[in-house]
Image (tube, rainbow, N blue to C red):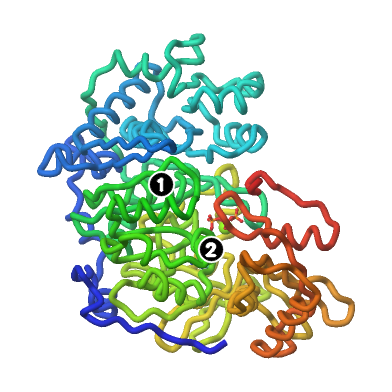
Amino acid sequence: MEKHFIDKKAEDFSVRPNIMEYAQEYASFKWEDVSAHFEGLPSGGLNIAHEAIDRHANGLLAEKTALVWLGENGERRTYTFLEMKKQTAKFANVLQTLGVEKGERVFTLSTRLPELYIAALGILKNRSVLCPLFSQFGPEPILQRLVRGDAKVLLTTKILFEKKVRSLLDQLKDLRYVLLIDAEEDESDQIRSLPRLMENVSEYFDILPTDPEDMSVLHFTSGTTGMPKGVVHVHKAIYTHWMSGRYVLDLHEDDIYWCTADPGWVTGTSYGIITPWLHGVTNIVDEAEFDAARWYSILQNERVSVWYTAPTAIRRLMRLDTNPRDEYDLSALRLVQSVGEPLNPEAVIWGMEKLKLPIHDNWWQTETGGIMIANLLSQQIRPGSMGRPLPGIDAGVVMHHDDGSVSEITEANKEGELALRPGWPSMFRAYLHNDEKYANSFVGGWYLSGDLAYKDEDGYFWFVGRADDIIKTSGHMVGPFEVESTLMEHPAVAEAGVIGKPDPLIGQLVKAFVSLKSGYEPSEDLRRELIGFGRKRLGVAVAPKELEFQQSLPKTRSGKIMRRLLKAREMGLPEGDTSTLED
Ligand code: ATP
Ligand code: MG
């Protein structure tokens, strides 16, 4: 595939980027220096909620809007940092009243309501562990996570409780309380009305000493490659959040920031709750699900300046083939970042054409707790590349040898496993109930990510695919991402998922599943055209030999294409864990 790079010029920036010289900043960066941007608790230690909310509420930002909440039905509510301080204090006091202790797990299962955000920080104030669940999970995945995560309290809404939780209660003997966000009265000693509890508590709460290594958040991974893993994080993670907020999201105090991810996924907590508030920035929360017109209107009406979203959403916008700049005033928007899946070069180009801004890709995982590799605002973008490691992050491409040892591949453009040198502050501290898997993730002084990548001469990392998804065909290794991105260059293609289908002659055969943009219909001619298109661009060895149309591809609820499902279905095998499969 031909590569086009996008250069940046000083006049591209309406605000001077926080990082101008990558190499210099990378060389001089020290994690210790980040602590100067935190206040620390009066009682000692470091607590996320204090740094994100209370210290602003106690200072110059008290009356500044922290949260803008957009309700599904057009309601708009705002909360200042001071109000957030009081509300989160009350929630922490509620937990105190109920005897919920440090380290105990408090789960949330809610649509994106203000109470969810208040509770998240209140839980951290109480030094309990925040365990967010995605509200669209069905009863089985909810039960599984509550049990595995040792839930003591569940915060939810009446509707979600009735639909999904009530029938599980007799299997949840350790669940002491269910707090209902919208119930007027308590139902029992166990099932309580949150508003009633909040009425009777103080709006002052002194956070007790918090060790930076105290557990803060328990997140489950997306389940793209198998059974979701519980991933444990600590308060110290905010060093990474602060750093990446500064360098990747380029947060400045008067930014209006919108992260479209749900707190049920790590992006929605690390970057939908914690990071913007660490920087004292106004944070937009939209209760509703994706809708192109609604989203463009939010960007316009709220004057969003920094937008953090995902490839799946961008592909949906691309599919519509509209000209948002003609229909909406997006003049405030100055930076678009994307994470979660590989961002096809075509999407970056679409951004340039339609949003008049390139889309910046960045890479991280639930396990890394924060962004590790990114395309920075001030730096050249290489569409299709995830960018370069952030200051403080040591990333490499490594080879896992048969004897179990690991060595770094220093040669440019050579594929291997993407790995990080352990020790960055937001590194996960455990896989829940799986010490062995945790230990096995660290080999030879590296954390092994399970993703394959290569690094070019200038240190940009290029995603190849997940180790599990790599296709071995006629002696070649083919990464699905490259094939998918090429197919997406064809005007008819909206999304593509590529797998290796076992084949007796060539090991695996490259098979593509494709969904089409509006205005195109599946046909034998189009199928042949796409296969020919792939051959011309990729060569016969790499191009798909088979291609099948699908209405839409199976995705996780966080929007990732589930290639393992495409493969299982193709081969008639059991589908495995589908708890995160989108409806
Ligand atoms: P599971 O671990 O349960 O299979 P998951 O890996 O999808 O699920 P997450 O932690 O949410 O769970 O996702 C991290 C993964 O998402 C990365 O390991 C990578 O495969 C993919 N990913 C994230 N960002 C990017 C990106 N910018 N480019 C390519 N892949 C990305
Ligand atoms: Mg993973």
Residue 405 lies in what quarter of the image? bottom right
Position of residue 408 measured from the top left corner of the image (x, y, whole percent): 51, 79
Inspect this view and state whether residue 552 appears: yes
Q: Which mark is residue 269?
A: 1
Camera-side residue: 415 or 10? 10
Along the horizontal axis of the image, is 542 left or right of 174?
right
Q: Earlier in the sequence, mark 2 or mark 1?
A: 1
Is the CB of the residue bearing disc 1 within 8 angstroms of ligand 1?
no
Report helix, strand or loop for mark 1: helix
Along the horizontal axis of the image, is 506 left or right of 173?
right
Q: Which mark is residue 320?
A: 2
- Residue drawn 35% across the image and 69% down it: 390
Give the vertical position of 490 relative to 558 (above or below): below
Task: State the quadrant of the N terminus.
Answer: bottom right
Q: Amino acid at mark 2?
A: Leu
Q: Amino acid at mark 1?
A: Thr
Camera-side residue: 462 or 356? 356
Give the vertical position of 457 relative to 291 (above or below): below
Q: Which mark is residue 51?
A: none
